Image (cartoon, coloured by chain):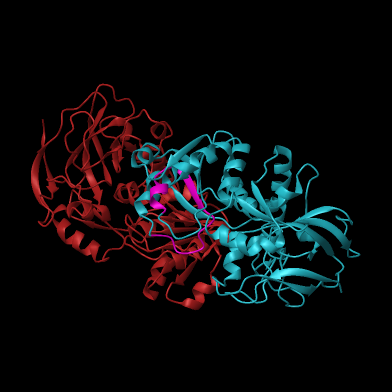
Chain colours: A cyan, B red
Amino acid sequence: MTAFTAYCACDAHAPLVPRLFERRELRADDVAIAIHYCGVCHSDAHQIHNDWNNTVYPCVPGHEIVGRVTAVGPEVTRYKVGDRVAVGCLVDSCQQCAPCADGQEQHCQQGPTATYNGKDRITGETTYGGYAERIVVREKFVLRVPDALDPRYAAPLLCAGITVWTPMRQHGVGKGSKVAVIGLGGLGHLGVKLAVALGAEVTVITTSASKAEDARTLGAHHVLLSTDAKAMLAAMNGFDFILDTIPTRHNVNPYLMLLGRQGAMVVVGAIELLEPVHGALLMRNNRSLAGSLIGGIADTQELLDFCAEHQVLPRCEMIAMPEINTAITRMLANDVKYRFVIDMAK
Amino acid sequence: MTAFTAYCACDAHAPLVPRLFERRELRADDVAIAIHYCGVCHSDAHQIHNDWNNTVYPCVPGHEIVGRVTAVGPEVTRYKVGDRVAVGCLVDSCQQCAPCADGQEQHCQQGPTATYNGKDRITGETTYGGYAERIVVREKFVLRVPDALDPRYAAPLLCAGITVWTPMRQHGVGKGSKVAVIGLGGLGHLGVKLAVALGAEVTVITTSASKAEDARTLGAHHVLLSTDAKAMLAAMNGFDFILDTIPTRHNVNPYLMLLGRQGAMVVVGAIELLEPVHGALLMRNNRSLAGSLIGGIADTQELLDFCAEHQVLPRCEMIAMPEINTAITRMLANDVKYRFVIDMAK
């Protein structure tokens, strides 16, 4: 056993505090990782505060993990000590069902094992995440960070990135696609960058004129103010795909109107009830309102490779581990461009 | 000018009454049709009663029209006097925009011309529908009724049929698809028959155990009672495609749960606000909630040809024109299996 420090929540109302944990003994197919960077995800705040009524305390958040291999179990074949690796939202799944066979472990019929606040499939113990010095993960769920990808920027790809990548791939976003992105936060800013890199014509939809300049520096070709009724009307029927990253309950109808024939709007942020959808807006143009949940391991590797090749890098604000409580408060106030990343060496 | 009798609504509260109308002079590309059969659609009742606040009185309903050609304009090439023909929900469109070019006239960017309560693109006069002895329609919007298709049964295909056909084709329903149909009315019963004919494994979802036998005689392989919580749980994640024909505001969440990965549920009946959808249900399995609006002219012809080849025949109750008011009252009380069809010769 090796002791290491992690920042954990001990109840829903207290700040995160450092605490010593024991690293689990390596299983035959385990990879031990020294964590160098960990992104701070909006869902971390939900879990810390028990917003979903399922948090097990102590809770060590963090599922955007980048580091180096420090040890491997005897059956590990793809990684060796020193390799630059990453871990996302999942650390295990049944590996037996159709979704697992298709590389969609996030939809595992038995439920995948979450990187933190999950339940280890062998011991039943709670899993602990990346706000920590170390983690041990089954080889199958460890990703390779390409040499060409700056490891500081790889972290936000592991959740924010794959969350927006999967629906764009599923719905065939590419050259000639007309794409809109609603919301310019951790997810939205990556949606813009990835859609542009895929060759789409990209519009950012925002309530705030002040974000227009930001949107353009991210590569967006157009900005549409949702408060400008005339502009919204002029944009009606104009998009093939809309990525909706709004993280709270909201009215999707004004956006649905913007979809052209067989267009799809995909909700990736709001894990709650939406305002009532009007059936006629779905029927007009045969539109669809869809959802998408993170992504599978193979797709996440594809994303890391794509971002290395096209140098798609998230915009991050680097923090030291002890700054985490301030960072979470700022994130909840939308005061970050666009993702906090913990640098364990700071 | 030729006078003919049609049944029309003169205000939202009065019954339909017979009245004499004048047939319009034939334009160069017009086809004059003697109407033999006309289906009674749920939307006819909405229009008669001005539920959508857009009815122009007098209103002659009816957009499931089957008859024979009695005269043609000089430029008509595809039809001749005596041909068995049909007219559905549309009688014109701009023929210039991308949807029209793609054969999706229902999504015409200038708005298609509805068969009744529409506005003629040349004269601006109100269009009158199929509760009548005659109609004149532009050749492009006239369909051919194949010899192998009993004309009595062709009528409900023109709106109910194409409404369920289009989304099944768009979403690739075929051999091996697991399809559920919610609601067993005019639309739903055709959804079952067409999905079966396309080779799908079909389940009818209903609140009423008494409909189970009916569902099976229509060809459904399974029946799922939505009131049976245990059965609903067992069916979770099981369907590729769900056709939702419920015509009023309802809660789609219990049905969304039944969709498997990338599964789509398509709303074709409820032209109003739905109960709030839960974002997490869309994200799980990357599901989508879509809509679909009738269908284009080429697709409607494809449907008529398919039904002739596979002998997919709606179940109809034939009525005489003077029985129309009783029929509408019974339709609104769900007292019809499954579509009233007016037989003009009765």
For residue A295, side relative to residue B37 (left or right):
right
User: Is A9 part of what is drawn in magenta?
Assistant: no
Q: Residue A115, how many percent across, how many down?
A: 70, 65
For residue A129, side relative to residue B141 (left or right):
right
User: Is A262 part of what is drawn in magenta?
Assistant: yes
Quadrant of res B297: top left
Q: Is residue A286 above or below residue A141?
A: above
Q: Quadrant of the C terminus of chain A?
A: bottom right
Q: Quadrant of the N terminus of chain A?
A: bottom right
Quadrant of res B70: top left
Q: Residue B265, how many percent across, how many down?
A: 47, 57
Q: Residue B62, how many percent across, how many down?
A: 23, 47
**Residue located at (82% from left, 60% from top):** A34
Q: Residue furthest right?
A: A74
Q: Which residues are magenta?
A: A252-275
**Residue located at (21% from left, 28% from top):** B122
The answer to which of A31 and B286 lies nearer the viewer is A31
Q: Is residue A160 above or below residue B182?
A: above
The answer to which of A170 and B307 lies nearer the viewer is A170
Res A261 seen here: no
Res A199 seen here: yes
Q: Is residue A341 above or below residue B111?
A: below
Q: Residue B271, how many percent across, how many down?
A: 32, 54
Count of all numbered marks drawn on residues in the image:
0
The answer to which of A167 and B204 lies nearer the viewer is A167
Quadrant of res A130: bottom right
The answer to which of A1 and B237 lies nearer the viewer is A1
